[in-house]
């Protein structure tokens, strides 16, 4: 794990384990966990891989949170501990200036409000990101 002033930057395989462990803990301790899948446009003249944005975004979220991106990937995933899905629009407003004019689309999900397992949380956030991309860049899509 790499340490920053903000969130922990972790390998994508470790990230999946963290999501699993955090949702189990959240279930026992009765708190919420949210995920945001943030897709960036890796085409065109201003193309930037998501992995190049990790450090800048990590400093914009809390030290209790985690962020992962595979090298060369077009997607970043944020694990947000004790964050409601209603907090996600504010988070994206705060992170947007750090995206440095990169076209992005994001999807979010919240355990236990919209998802009941870690796998469902990840799948839902990814599906919402794809829906946001379909609807147009610069938006966050959440389950209804």
Image (spheres, rainbow, N blue to C red):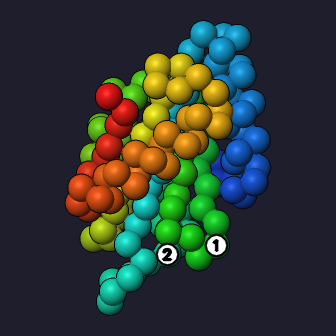
Q: Which mark is residue 49?
A: 2
- On the image, the x and y values in percent for residue 135 come to 24, 55
Image x and y of residue 30, in percent: 60, 10
Please report contact status of discs 2 and 1: CB closer than 8 Å, yes or no: yes
Q: Is residue 133 above or below residue 115?
A: below
Most distant residue in the bottom direction: 45
Residue 101: quarter of image: bottom left
Relative to residue 70, is residue 117 depicted above or below?
above
Q: Residue at x 76, y 49 (%)?
A: 14
Who is closer to the viewer here, 51 or 127?
127
Horizontal and vertical percent position of residue 74: 50, 69
Residue 122 higher or lower than 58, as above or below:
above
Q: Nearer the viewer, residue 56 or 86?
A: 86
Q: Is residue 143 visible?
A: yes
Can you tell which quarter of the image residue 102 is in?
bottom left
Which secondary structure lies at badge 2? loop
- Residue 70 horizontal side relative to residue 103, left or right: right
Q: Quadrant of the C terminus?
A: top left
Secondary element under disc 1, as helix, strand or loop, is loop
Question: Which residue is the site of mark 1?
Answer: 71
Q: Is residue 15 left or right of residue 97?
A: right
Q: Which mark is residue 91?
A: none
The picture quadrant where one finds residue 64 is top right
**Is the residue marked by circle 2 packed among few (<14), some (14-19), or many (20+) residues within 10 Å?**
many
Q: Would residue 94 be seen by someone viewing this image from the given angle?
A: no
Pointer 1 local density, CA inside 10 Å: few below 14, some 14–19, many at least 20: few
Residue 115 in the image, given as x and y percentages of width and height? 53, 26
Q: How many marks?
A: 2
Q: Residue at x 32, y 59 (%)?
A: 133
User: Which callout, 2 or 1, points at the residue further toward the start of the chain?
Assistant: 2
Q: CA distance from mark 2 to mark 1?
A: 8 Å
The residue at 26%/51% (across/down) is 139
């Amino acid at each position: 794990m790499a340490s920053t002033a903000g969130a922990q930057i972790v390998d994508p395989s470790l990230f999946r384990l963290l999501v699993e462990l955090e949702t189990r803990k959240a279930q026992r301790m009765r708190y919420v966990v949210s995920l945001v899948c943030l897709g960036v446009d890796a085409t065109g003249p201003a193309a930037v891989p998501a992995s190049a944005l990790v450090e800048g975004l990590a400093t914009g979220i809390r030290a209790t949170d985690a962020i992962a991106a595979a090298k060369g990937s077009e997607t970043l995933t944020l694990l947000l501990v004790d964050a409601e899905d209603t907090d996600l629009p504010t988070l994206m407003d705060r992170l947007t200036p750090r995206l440095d004019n990169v076209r992005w689309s994001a999807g979010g999900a919240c355990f236990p409000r919209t998802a009941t397992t870690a796998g469902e949380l990840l799948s839902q956030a990814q599906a919402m990101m794809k829906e946001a991309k379909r609807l147009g860049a610069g938006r966050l899509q959440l389950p209804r």
